[in-house]
Amino acid sequence: MPNKKKIINDPVFGFLTIPNDLLYDVLQHPYVQRLGRIRQLGLSNVVYPGAMHSRFLHSIGAMHLMQDAIAVLRQKGVSISESEATGAQIAILLHDVGHGPFSHVLEHTLVDDVTHEDISLIMMEQINRDLTRQQPQLRLEGTGLLDGAIDIFRDEYHRHFLHQLISSQLDVDRMDYLCRDSFFTGVQEGRVASERLIKMLNVVDDRLVVEQKGIYSVEKFLVARRLMYWQVYLHKTSVAAEQLLIKILARAKELAARGVELFCAPALHYFLYNHITRSDFAPDSEALAQYALLDDSDVLSAIKAWMSCDDRVLRLLSTAFTNRNLFRSRLLTEPIGEEERQLLREHYVQALGIQPDEADYFFVEHVSTSNTYSEKDASIDILYNDGSVRDIAEASEILDLRSLTRKPKKLYLFQFRA
């Protein structure tokens, strides 16, 4: 029997432990191991060269914070069984398992009408089947090893606060990625006191709350999240690189539809040469099996090969991406008019020697937007010493409701340098 009591040395939180055999088996599943081949921050390394950490590292960090949160809640008298604790840890470990290469790029180009959240849930069901097949008794009973974890992830388990630890406006997912992304990018404004936030957690009426003395840590958490979005996640250069990548994959998809044979790995070939939608994804499906083989290296190696392909558009875009000759960005106050759009088309036709119907591959308008706090989602609740509970938007003396819920937008024009 292999030793499943592993210790992982994490640069952010130190030594992490795998608490039981089931979590180890989930961690070893090929779907989870694949996350080690997908960058957590997509193309942010074009701005922050240190941002090369993987989604696997984020997932085990979030699992570690879940362990800490459960331990704190138990100390405060919240009854959490071992099966519930394991289920919550599995759910957070797998919360990002459906992410494709380069974050959301795949969702906009190679597949239709399916999100990484949809695929995450389908992958969880597949992992549940795979692990349960090893337990004949469970097969006979019609139950799965991950049934509880999936119920918690879906918010179908009767204890709602466990789902809030995984997905809410103050969850261990956000606590980890803010700490981790600020560490690897070097953006100090993103650092949050995750340990203190967790120490301040409690449960009231099946709702996750933060004790009153933790209010300042919550305020800093919300400010850090706002700053990280505009300094890292929505940095104009990172978005420019992402828009260029989207154009590359869109062109490759168009050429594939015409029957042009392009060099690429089998998994990427499957999505380029087939029209894949939400209905194609299911446990044990071909679409899911191919998706599980797709990672960053497939896309990068294909783009490097396309630098010498026959199609001039794909060749120009791929060469620019590989050599970091990214789209130039221009902040707009209003969308460009049809006259300017036509001038751009004419410019690229003349400058690049392309056809008029190909010019749109070389520029794009894009809106970047983010909000710190959403009134529509479950609130971050503050527990006062008298037992009352108030929304952070009302309780904060520093952040007013308008600044918390305002959703600023930036409109950019990204265009090829020619």
Image (tube, rainbow, N blue to C red):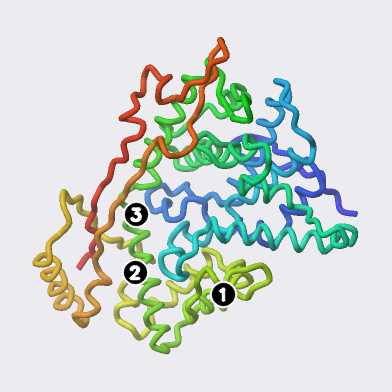
Which kind of residue does numbered mark 3 sit on? Val
Q: Residue 371's quadrant in the figure?
A: top left
Crowd around label 3: few <14 · some 14–19 · many ≥20 (10 Å): many
Comes first in the chain, label 1 or label 2? 2
Residue 298 picture location, percent across and down: 52, 70
Residue ID at (53%, 26%): 193
* Residue highlighted by disc 3: 239
Q: Residue 279's quadrant in the figure?
A: bottom right
Which kind of residue does numbered mark 1 sit on? Ala
Q: CA distance from mark 1 to mark 3?
A: 25 Å
Left-right relation of 398 to 168: left
Residue 79 picture location, percent across and down: 75, 28
Q: Which mark is residue 247?
A: 2
* Residue highlighted by disc 1: 267
Q: Nearer the viewer, residue 74 or 198?
A: 74
> Are circles 1 and 3 on residues that touch, CB within 8 Å?
no
Residue ID at (65%, 35%): 14
Crowd around label 2: few <14 · some 14–19 · many ≥20 (10 Å): many
Q: Dot 3 lies on which element?
A: helix
Residue ID at (34%, 41%): 230
